[in-house]
Amino acid sequence: MQIFEIKQPKKSPKVTLVGAGPGSRDLITLRGYRALQHADAILYDALVDPGLLDEVSGDIPKIYVGKRCGKDGISQDGINALLVEHAFTYGHVVRLKGGDPFVFGRASEEIEHLESFGIPVDVVPGISSAIAAPAGQGIPVTKRGVSTSFWVVTATTKEGTFPKDLQLASQSSATLLILMGVRKLKQIVDLVCKHRSGMTPFALIQNASKDTERCTTGTLNNAAAITKTIDLTQPGVIVIGDVVAEHPSFFEEEVRRVLHSTI
Ligand SMILES: C[S@@+](CC[C@H](N)C(=O)[O-])C[C@H]1O[C@@H](n2cnc3c(N)ncnc32)[C@H](O)[C@@H]1O
């Protein structure tokens, strides 16, 4: 039960959940940008570019409520409580979330909590990292004659195990887009290799659309060796499927790897 002092708000309480896009501040939608300009308070996540907040005029509260890998931050109950409190205190609160609010964003829990207090909620979609990360690297998630569908799967459930869908997706021929999986890359590849050829291309795109973006490509066979060369603390999207061969330097990197392994 949430207890707080109800102050007289300047305006009626209202919350807009805004998808900030994958990282770079100019990948927010125009509608999301406008919502920010009309905010009386902002609560923002870890993967949101803080530079975006500098573009918000006016001296309004901008509160960081980020948590990376589900740890080291405020709990979801704490965020829900802050949203209600700020909406009643300030009026229009923008809840700025990385990517799209409804893609592994816990938006539904926030909406349910807010609505239980009678606070109206709007949602502004955002560009999900699931699509933006491969697109920014020239990797199409579908391609005529190569891939007719894609699955967006999390590698981290609340129980801490792989979801059953990861296995089902591996058994299909769809492009796999795996979020929250960088630290488990080796185990993911082991699972996918039970159902797909070791020659299947994969890419790991970290910090997509930011200055620190890094893309690593290879085949499932050499993923274990590649894992040793990457920074596992940086967020990334894992792409598995033949579409990865469309990456402009995929073949060049493969040739280099083969040459190095035979020296
Ligand atoms: C809690 S999920 C939120 C996803 C978000 N709602 C979206 O639509 O992109 C966080 C995961 O998204 C992925 N992610 C988010 N931003 C990213 C970025 N800029 N580059 C690579 N992966 C990113 C990573 O897999 C990260 O662990």
Image (cartoon, rainbow, N blue to C red):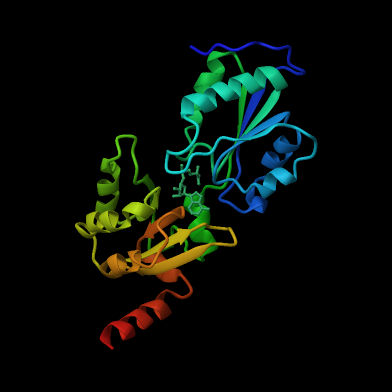
Residue situated in front as seen by the camera: 63 or 135: 63
Front-most of residues 122 and 188: 188
Does residue 186 appear in this view? Answer: yes
Looking at the figure, which quarter contains the C terminus? bottom left
Q: Report the label total.
A: 0
Q: Is residue 216 left or right of residue 113?
A: left
Q: Position of residue 64 (x, y in %)?
A: 60, 37
Residue lying at the far right of the rendered structure: 58
Residue 260 screen position, x and y as percent: 32, 84
State which quadrant residue 30 falls in: top right
Residue 14 appears at what percent x and percent y? 66, 22
Q: Residue at x 48, y 24 (%)?
A: 77
Q: Residue at x 30, y 66 (%)?
A: 223
Horizontal and vertical percent position of residue 96: 61, 37
Q: Is residue 96 above or below residue 209?
A: above
- Image point 65% across, 21% down: which residue? 87
The residue depicted at 34 percent of the width and 46 percent of the height is: 155
- Tell me: residue 18, above or below residue 190: above
- Whether residue 172 is visible, yes or no, is no
**Viewer-proximal residue among 107 and 124:** 107
